[in-house]
């Protein structure tokens, strides 16, 4: 079941003519000619579509919070600042099929009553920005954007805004600050963007994949979308798979397949690379807890874990993780968990905006302490020190970057404490190039 | 005075700047800082104080408003760089795919460390965080172009090509 990527490999799908030949822009025709904005919102609510950027908040509900004071413009801003390590699904979708996003932007803007909308794309993807701008021009030329779209009286201008290289701008209020031409420092909420967003006007910020899915929901109805998936995990999800698998790439899965199928089936990742064994997975982007092979494949109750919001988080952080952004990073037995955690700690240290002390100082501490453990200079008390620092960051910052930085460190220690201890107890072994601790009896150590 | 006058966008880019400023509501054209800084860096390779002052003058804002933005976002070079800036991803997924070895080869090949520029001014190496191309790692970027699934051999080919 493919919704967003059904035609992604059709040659020329990036052009509006080919895109329209494969059913493109029918959702715009239907929404604008046959539906009211509230009816579109209602279908999105019915679909159960949840925010695909990582938080998983219901999209229709987010839309319904949008303030609509008379005479004040409202904005839709698409969050295409994809920067969470392991995540490259929006990059792929916009690069291959820009009109899929643009069609969704038009439908969603119509539903929200926005007459100007922006797609905020991370600046490193400048080539994708050029692809989007070309596609937007095509949509203007066909009358799907601009004044009086399809003779309906509805006007919409759509622009692409480049970022400048800052992970924090994926946080919606930081993104809005950035869109205003400022440093990307997150704002204190409330007020929420739905009330005071960009330029203090009501604003909805949605992820690329969320917005792109709204076209299919308009075409087929919210109930049809909700019929895909399991429970509150409705529809399809783009999963960007990387690491030690046979076939890294972006896959659109119906929510609800088993994690085991996703990793081992030839339809998806195709299994672990030849001659190697699964050791660990970071299932939803670098910020979500890492799980060992056993824990990612099965829940604590011994049931097969599913690719859904609920199943992946089954067991809480004690034994579970999160679907997050769908950045699925697979590691085999050659992976040093301490080293991998170091790259994540360094990432969050680098990307902390510096506004809140627990995050600014704490990410630096974690980076430095893991660095010394990895380089054979660890002290016995360092592991508990890391747990303590992570605890003091979590929940004590304006935005979720603090949590995102704390979780991977805390989880790596929770599930791979022996590996950290080995580094501290056997520094002479740990600093050897390619050295990896093998847990006695572990499935990947056989 | 003469040096200052050299910092002016070509007419075509100036037209584009005017268009970009109209993307935002009346009076909110400060939003154009990032797009214009990208244009400026493409034109002059790095964001010198003079370049940032020029951007401020285009937007009729205080120079410090441009400095504080340019220094926050990692894409803007605040020091001179070489002709080709190689920005390699050092984050987890690229490391899993052997990034460190490939980047070591790159540094050896060019005879410089991260953050340095070759003596002929041809290449600068910078370390960056995740480039959202994890499934195609190891990855580096030179200007807008992504170079993916890098190996030592591929790095040599790329450097050979760019050295011509």
Image (cartoon, rainbow, N blue to C red):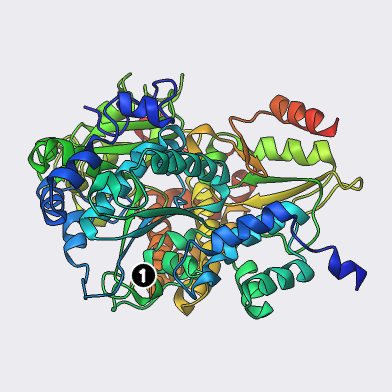
**From what the image shows, is residue B30 above or below residue A215?**
below
Q: Quadrant of residue A378?
A: bottom right
A436 vs A272, left or right, is: right
Q: Is residue B119 left or right of residue A263?
A: right
**Where is residue A377 shown, x and y percent of the image?**
62, 59
| Residue at screen point 83% across, 50% down | B117
The quarter of the rendered structure image containing the N terminus of chain A is top left
Q: Nearer the viewer, residue B149 or A419?
A: B149
Residue at 26 percent across and 69 percent down: it is: A194
Taking the image as shown, residue B66 lies to the left or right of residue B106, namely left
Measured along the vertical axis of the image, is residue A110 above or below residue B95? below
Residue A429, by quadrant, is top right
Chain containing mark 1: A
Numbered disc 1: secondary structure: loop
Across and down, in percent, residue A229 comes to 14, 37
Q: Residues within 10 Å of mark 1 (few under 14, many from 20)?
A: some
Residue A282, can we see it? no
Q: Would residue A276 be visible to someone looking at this image?
A: yes
The image quadrant where one finds the C terminus of chain A is top left
Reading the image, the residue beneath label 1 is: A394
Image location (x, y in percent) of residue A336: 51, 42
Residue at horizontal 46%, vertical 78%?
A: A356
Image coords of residue A130 (percent x, y): 54, 42
Front residue of this view, candidates A414 and A154: A154
Question: Residue B41 versus residue A394: which sits nearer the camera?
Answer: B41
């Amino acid at each position: 079941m493919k919704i967003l990527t059904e035609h992604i490999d059709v040659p020329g799908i990036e052009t509006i003519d080919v895109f329209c030949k494969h059913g493109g822009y029918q959702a715009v025709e239907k929404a604008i000619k046959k539906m009211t904005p509230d009816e579109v919102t209602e279908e999105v609510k019915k679909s159960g579509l949840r925010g695909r950027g990582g938080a998983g908040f219901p999209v229709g509900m987010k839309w319904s919070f949008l303030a609509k004071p008379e005479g004040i413009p409202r904005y839709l801003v698409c969050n295409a600042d994809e920067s969470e390590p392991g995540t490259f699904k929006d990059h792929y979708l916009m690069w291959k099929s820009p009109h899929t996003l643009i069609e969704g932007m038009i439908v969603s803007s119509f539903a929200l009553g926005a007459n100007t909308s922006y797609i905020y794309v991370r600046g490193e993807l400048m080539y994708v920005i050029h692809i989007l701008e070309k596609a937007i021009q095509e949509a203007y030329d066909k009358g799907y954007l601009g004044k009086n779209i399809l003779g309906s009286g509805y006007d919409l201008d759509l622009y692409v805004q480049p970022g400048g290289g800052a992970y924090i701008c994926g946080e919606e209020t930081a993104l809005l600050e950035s869109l205003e031409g400022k440093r990307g420092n997150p704002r204190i909420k409330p007020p929420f963007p739905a009330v005071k967003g960009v330029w203090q006007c009501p604003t909805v910020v949605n992820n690329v994949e969320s917005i792109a899915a709204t076209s299919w929901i308009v075409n087929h109805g919210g109930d049809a979308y909700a019929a895909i998936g399991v429970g509150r995990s409705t529809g399809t999800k783009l999963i960007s798979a990387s690491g030690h698998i046979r076939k890294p790439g972006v896959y659109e899965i119906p929510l609800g397949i088993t994690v085991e199928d996703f990793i081992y089936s030839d339809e998806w990742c195709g299994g672990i690379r030849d001659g190697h064994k699964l050791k660990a997975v970071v299932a939803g982007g670098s910020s979500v807890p890492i799980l060992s092979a056993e824990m990612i494949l099965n829940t604590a109750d011994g049931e097969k874990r599913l690719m859904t919001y609920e199943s992946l988080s089954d067991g809480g952080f004690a034994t579970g993780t999160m679907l997050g952004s769908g950045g699925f990073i697979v590691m085999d037995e050659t992976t040093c968990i301490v080293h991998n955690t170091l790259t994540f700690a360094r990432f969050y240290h680098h990307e902390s905006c510096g506004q809140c002390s627990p995050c600014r100082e704490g990410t630096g501490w974690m980076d430095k302490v893991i660095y010394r453990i990895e380089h054979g200079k660890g002290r016995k008390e360092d592991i508990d020190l890391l747990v303590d620092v992570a605890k003091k960051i979590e929940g004590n910052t304006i935005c979720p970057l603090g949590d995102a930085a704390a979780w991977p460190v805390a989880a790596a220690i929770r599930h791979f404490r022996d590996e950290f201890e080995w580094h501290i107890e056997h520094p002479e072994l740990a600093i050897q190039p390619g050295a990896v601790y093998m847990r006695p009896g572990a499935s990947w150590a056989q | 005075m003469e040096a200052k006058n050299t910092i002016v966008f070509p007419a075509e880019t100036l037209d584009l700047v005017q268009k970009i400023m109209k993307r935002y509501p009346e009076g909110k054209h400060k939003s154009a800082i990032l797009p214009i800084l990208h244009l400026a860096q493409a034109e002059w390779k790095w964001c010198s104080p003079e370049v940032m002052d020029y951007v401020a003058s285009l937007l009729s804002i205080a120079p410090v408003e441009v400095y504080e933005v340019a220094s926050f976002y990692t894409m803007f070079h605040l020091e001179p760089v070489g002709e080709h800036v190689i920005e390699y991803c050092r984050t987890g997924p690229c490391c899993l795919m052997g990034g460190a070895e490939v980047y070591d080869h790159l540094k050896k090949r060019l005879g410089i460390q991260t953050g340095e520029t070759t003596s002929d001014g041809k290449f600068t190496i910078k370390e960056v965080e995740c480039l959202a191309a994890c499934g195609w790692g190891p990855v580096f970027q030179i200007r807008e172009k992504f170079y993916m699934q890098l190996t030592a051999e591929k790095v040599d080919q790329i450097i050979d090509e760019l050295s011509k």
